[in-house]
């Protein structure tokens, strides 16, 4: 799933409105957060009223709009409303991602159906029955979770499916290609990061904690080297009568 980027924290929205209402906000809304195709905007409605708007910046349509009177509404209520708006934006973004993934999975089913040579009626009959002794599972269509973590991550396979079923729809072809590339890169990127962290923890457990040598340079007033050594040891032991220069 896409990540959310925050530019203004929930608790700082009222403060930002008061600071910007007579300058930037008079000219244009300010982005509070982004998530996928969605942006959360802070806008000025009037001298005392701010607006919070979720907009799909690709389709240019407003999904949710709220307003608050800053003189009558406590900062905590505004912060809570902004947090809920961010949650709503995440839900909308996740729904878009899941809907696109599901569409690609449907193309996978259609492709699998053509490969095994089963018609829709036969496929439906098999899906409506259950056989505990069926060992021929490798020829069955994968469910969406298995597909997403298997064939879907094969970028060449997935892009081939998209081009096959959208060859005559150039607009959506490019949209789905861009989505699949970004989605697969994000999914495999997270997998790679998790594997790297797991490997680092494993190596740390095998090798144990490594000790490092640290050197600190300080100056202490003394009559000779031994006197200086004793003064430094006294300082390290907590004797605040000893003064040093770092």
Image (spheres, rainbow, N blue to C red):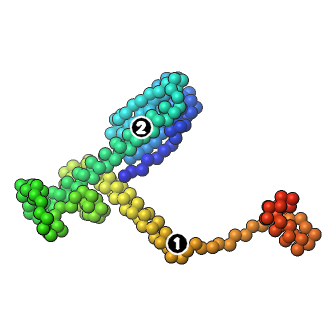
Give the camera-side residue of 160 and 66.
Answer: 66
Q: Are marks 1 and 2 in contact (CB under 8 Å)?
A: no
| Image quadrant containing the C terminus | bottom right
Horizontal side of 13 relative to 244 (left or right) equals left
Q: Which mark is residue 7?
A: none
**Residue at the limit of the structure toward the right, as seen here:** 223
Give the camera-side residue of 18 and 87.
Answer: 87
Count of numbered circles on the image:
2
Horizontal side of 164 relative to 35 (left or right) equals left
In the rendered image, which quarter is residue 87 located in?
top left
Horizontal side of 76 relative to 60 (left or right) equals right
Mark sitting earlier along the chain (1/2)? 2
Give the camera-side residue of 126 and 38.
Answer: 126
Rendered position, 167 above or below 225: above
Q: CA distance from mark 1 to mark 2?
A: 41 Å
Q: Determine crowd level at label 2: few under 14, some 14-19, many 20+ residues with C-alpha closer than 10 A.
A: many
Of badges 1 and 2, nearer the viewer stands 1
What residue appears at the point 73 percent right and 69 percent down from the top-left corner? 215
Mark yes or no: residue 164 visible: no
Q: Determine crowd level at label 1: few under 14, some 14-19, many 20+ residues with C-alpha closer than 10 A.
A: few
What residue appears at the point 39 percent right and 51 percent down from the top-left corner? 2
What residue appears at the point 51 percent right and 31 percent down from the top-left corner? 25
In the rendered image, which quarter is residue 153 located in?
bottom left
What residue appears at the point 54 percent right and 76 percent down from the top-left corner? 207
Horizontal side of 146 relative to 132 (left or right) equals right
Mark yes or no: residue 205 visible: yes
What residue is shown with label 2? 85
Q: Which mark is residue 204?
A: 1
User: Under tag 2, what secondary structure?
Assistant: helix
* Image coordinates for residue 130, horizontal then vertical, percent: 12, 60
* Image coordinates for residue 46, horizontal then vertical, percent: 49, 23
User: Under tag 1, what secondary structure?
Assistant: helix
């Amino acid at each position: 799933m896409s990540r959310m980027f925050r530019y203004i924290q929930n608790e700082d929205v009222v403060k930002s409105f008061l600071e910007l209402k007579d300058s930037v906000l008079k000219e244009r809304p300010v982005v509070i957060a982004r998530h996928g195709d969605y942006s959360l905007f802070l806008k000025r409605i009037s001298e005392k009223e701010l607006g919070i708007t979720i907009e799909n910046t690709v389709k240019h349509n407003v999904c949710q709009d709220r307003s608050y009177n800053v003189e009558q509404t406590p900062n905590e209520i505004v912060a809570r409303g902004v947090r809920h708006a961010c949650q709503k934006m995440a839900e909308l973004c996740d729904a878009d991602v899941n809907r696109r993934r599901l569409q690609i999975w449907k193309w996978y089913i259609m492709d699998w159906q053509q490969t095994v040579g089963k018609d829709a009626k036969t496929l439906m009959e098999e899906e409506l029955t259950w056989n505990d002794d069926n060992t021929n599972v490798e020829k069955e269509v994968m469910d969406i979770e298995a597909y997403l973590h298997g064939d879907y991550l094969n970028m060449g396979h997935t892009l081939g499916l998209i081009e096959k079923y959208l060859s005559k729809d150039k607009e959506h072809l490019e949209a789905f290609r861009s989505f699949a590339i970004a989605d697969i890169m994000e999914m495999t990127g997270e997998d790679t990061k998790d594997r790297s962290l797991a490997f680092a923890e494993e190596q740390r457990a095998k090798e144990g904690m490594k000790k490092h040598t640290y050197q600190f340079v300080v100056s202490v007033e003394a009559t000779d080297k031994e006197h200086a050594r004793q003064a430094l040891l006294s300082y390290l032991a907590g004797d605040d009568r000893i003064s040093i220069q770092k």
